[in-house]
Image (tube, rainbow, N blue to C red):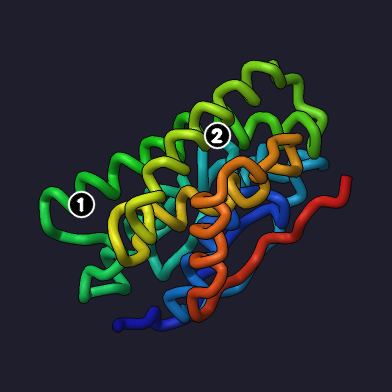
Amino acid sequence: MTTPARPIRLYRHPLSGHAHRVELFLSLLRLPFELVDVDLKSGAHKAPEFLRKNPFGQVPVIEDGDVTLADSNAILVYLAARYDPAGRWLPRDPVAAARVQQWLSVAAGQLVAGPGAARLARVFGAKVDVDRAKAIAAQLLTVVDQHLSARRFLAGDAPTVADIAMYTYTAHAPEGGVSLEPYGHVRAWLARVEELPGFAPMTRTAL
């Protein structure tokens, strides 16, 4: 596995699930990195200096040498392609790669609109249709639970970036009032992710 010439810089907020995806993957890859906390409450993500890194004014952003990249899923793909030449985390086989991409799309769609939105309302006080978010979460978790009844990880029997993208907002769904108790296969999968060497948790919010 290749390593960067100097530590990768990760701009994040400690309670951002999107940022945690990247922090978790950097840790699993055993890559050197440094964390730069962005004060969202004070609007630091909308300051001109940060907007030069990401015009959308969102975390996470990484700086890896002369590469500056935003969007958590894009960063996961970049890190896997650059620092995992064996292709363990991002398969090259067309079918396997497509299965991973399906879950990256879910992570950017239903996961954020469901468990992510419910948590956003409860933890950050965002104006969100909580009932709708919880309905999306219930449908999503039911599908994922059934899917995981036949496999250890989302895209097969080995972990990929699909699992990294889906982990955080699923694990922290209870912070948004979404219970994981009915979903035994989901809870077993979360435990398998947490047992991976180098796993790094995100701070849990006490509510």
Q: Position of residue 81 (x, y in %)?
A: 26, 64
Check the picture and name the quadrant holding the C terminus.
Answer: top right
The residue that disc 1 covers is 97
* Helix, strand or loop for disc 1: helix
Say which residue appears at 74% left-offset and 60% top-offset.
203
* Helix, strand or loop for disc 2: helix
Q: Residue furthest right?
A: 207
Say which residue appears at 43% left-offset and 67% top-offset.
64
Say which residue appears at 59% left-offset and 45% top-offset.
169
Q: Position of residue 143 (x, y in %)?
A: 43, 35
Say what amino acid the circle numbered 2 marks.
Val
Say what amino acid the circle numbered 1 marks.
Ala
The residue that disc 2 covers is 112
Question: In the depicted view, which residue is nearer to us: 123 or 42?
Answer: 123
Label 1: how many Cα within 10 Å (few below 14, some 14–19, many 20+) = some
| Residue 79 seen by the camera | no
Looking at the image, residue 197 sits to the left or right of residue 151; the answer is right
